[in-house]
Amino acid sequence: MQDFPAKLREFLESPRSIKVGVGIQSDCRKLYKDYNVSIRNCVELALMARSVDSRWKGKYENPIGLARLTETYLDRTLVKGKISISNWENELTKRQQDCEPVSWSCGTGPTPS
């Protein structure tokens, strides 16, 4: 990617919209390092769960991923596997494109179009 999309930069840097995710620290660092994009108003759901829910307290042994949070709080199963991991410079595969709306819908209801 030569230039970072202006509208996406505007959204990510806006303090008016809340961005949420799981395990997103490295993504935020990469966006800043590679494109000088400073994510604003971002919530790490795994850290939030650890700070407000006693079942996640104690010694940190296993990361809390989106699948575990989805099962715990929404009583739904999220099947993602490793297909979400990719090289940011490559185009998304069909499987990766199909995976993202599943992740999205676990938190918001209907899949975006």
Image: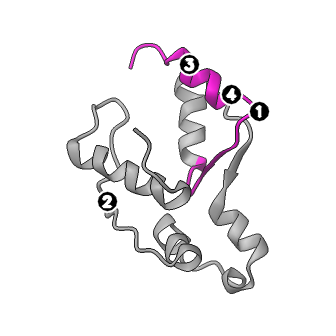
Report the residue at 39% width, 38% height from top: 113
Give the number of the disc on residue 82.
2
Give the number of the disc on residue 7.
3
Is the C-beta separation of discs 3 and 1 under 8 Å? no
The range drawn in magenta is 1-25
Report x, y in % for residue 90. Answer: 28, 31
Q: In terms of sequence position, does the residue under pointer 3 or pointer 1 come before the other?
A: 3
Q: Residues within 10 Å of mark 4 (few under 14, many from 20)?
A: some
Residue extending farthest left:
94
Report x, y in % for residue 3. Answer: 46, 13
Is the C-beta separation of discs 2 and 3 under 8 Å? no
How far apart marks 2 and 1 lie (CA) works out to 31 Å
Q: At label 1, which amino acid type do we have? A: Pro
Q: Which residue is mark 1?
A: 15
Q: In terms of sequence position, does the residue under pointer 2 or pointer 3 come before the other?
A: 3
Give the number of the disc on residue 13.
4
78 above or below 37?
below
Report the residue at 51% width, 70% height from top: 70
The mark lying in front, picked from 2 and 4, is: 4
Q: At label 3, which amino acid type do we have? A: Lys
Q: Residues within 10 Å of mark 2 (few under 14, many from 20)?
A: few
Q: Is residue 52 left or right of residue 89?
A: right
Q: Residues within 10 Å of mark 1 (few under 14, many from 20)?
A: few
Q: At label 4, which amino acid type do we have? A: Glu
How far apart marks 2 and 4 lie (CA) works out to 28 Å
The mark lying in front, picked from 2 and 3, is: 3
How far apart marks 3 and 4 lie (CA) works out to 10 Å
Q: In terms of sequence position, does the residue under pointer 2 or pointer 1 come before the other?
A: 1
